[in-house]
Amino acid sequence: MPELKKAAFKQKVPEYLEHLLASIRSEFGGKSPEYNAIYNQYFYSPLEDLVGKEHNLKHYEAALTSKGGLPHGLERLYKRQLVIDLTMVCAAHCRYCLRANYEPVQIKRSDIERIVAYIASDKHLKELLITGGDPFMVPRLLMELISEVVKKAPDIKIIRIGTRLPVQSPDKFDEELFGFFKSYGQSISFECAIQINHAIELQEQSRKIIEVLQKSGVRIYSQNVLLKNVNDNIPVLVELYDQLRYLGVEAHYLFHPVPLIGTHHFRTSIATALTLIKELTSSGRISGRIKPMLSLMTDVGKVTLYEGTLGAKDGQGYLDIQTNYRIKDRLRWNPDYLLPDSARVDNQGRIIVKYLDGRDD
Ligand code: SF4
């Protein structure tokens, strides 16, 4: 276990969000839930310094390190999918994000050839998830990587891109990127995962970018986070998912926040999260076509909550999470994979992982 310390995550708030906050302040007031919904996501709070039992300094460890000198930034957990962390740079720093604990590295142009050669050499790989950081912060590098994949790795059918840029700095998009998606749409299906945590983030400029991406052939889906004092109540969640539906954005995950040091003030208990998701998705309040899956980002991967997923809770507040991930699959697709200290394997070879509950006080 590495030494427990909170990473210094420099506050970074782009001009676009500063202006948005100013206009929300004049419309709703500086103490309104709408103002707090943005402010709390991006501004330092002294509550970050009250360190609890949160421990997850990083995401799960699935880096590919021994495959012929591949650069840092590739992760593999599954047969069909490779994760590429293109850059660790984002337009804004979300205070609850695990990227606070990563070095600000970036894949270089000179790495692209080796990455694409690895992708092309594995016929099982069908899908790439390009994330970070925010890949749209380095659009030229992103386009270069994708064009090389299209040329040399024809088995790749889907490319997903994780971003918050449409709601953090919509002014950073340009026509070249939209034209690129249009021109490659015959060869590859493009999908964008956007994290949008409150309907107030869906301002005119952001909506426009989402619409233009859609018109350029990119399917948009949401991977949102349930955050205390941002969106942890039913009217706000209903409004958010209604607005996403009207924009043609699909629902995917609603994550419980990762148990990172300095983020306990964002984390409801799992019991509260379950109460909210039941009310949101099984009460007739939103369309069945926009129901998110409440999921945990654990040390061994994402786990959606179903009956039987939650096991016993220990005296320290850690729950046993029963997954159906099998250790033999992990090692097959990534021989470098190391089971973290927080996980064990049950008698059927499935991984059980500890996950720190949140608190409602
Ligand atoms: S934009 Fe995404 S990767 Fe960057 S800090 Fe926010 S949540 Fe993390």
Image (cartoon, rainbow, N blue to C red):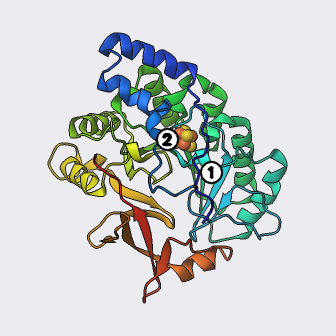
Q: Nearer the viewer, mark 2 or mark 1?
A: 2
Name which residue lies at 24% across and 38% down.
Answer: 238
Q: Among all residues in the image, which is located at the extreme left?
A: 283
Name which residue lies at 28% across and 46% down.
Answer: 361
Which of 21 and 294 lies nearest the eye of the viewer? 21
Residue 200 falls left or right of residue 272: right
Q: Among all residues in the image, which is located at the extreme right?
A: 110
Spatial CA span between label 2 and label 1: 48 Å
Name which residue lies at 34% across and 30% down.
Answer: 199
Residue linked to disc 1: 187
Circle 2 residues within 10 Å: few <14, some 14–19, many ≥20? few
Q: Position of residue 249 (x, y in %)?
A: 39, 40
**Residue 287 falls in image quadrant:** top left
Amino acid type, residue under disc 2 in the picture: Asp
Q: Position of residue 194 (x, y in %)?
A: 48, 41
Q: Is residue 249 above or below residue 98?
A: above
Residue linked to disc 2: 49
Q: Position of residue 123 (x, y in %)?
A: 66, 71
Amino acid type, residue under disc 1 in the picture: Ser
Q: Is residue 186 visible?
A: no
Circle 1 residues within 10 Å: few <14, some 14–19, many ≥20? few
Which of 289 and 318 lies nearest the eye of the viewer? 318
Q: Position of residue 141 (x, y in %)?
A: 74, 41
Which of 136 and 92 lies nearest the eye of the viewer? 92
Q: Is residue 296 above or below residue 341?
A: above
Q: Is residue 26 above or below residue 198?
A: above
Q: Among all residues in the image, which is located at the extreme top?
A: 26
Q: Earlier in the sequence, mark 2 or mark 1?
A: 2
Residue 276 falls left or right of residue 199: left
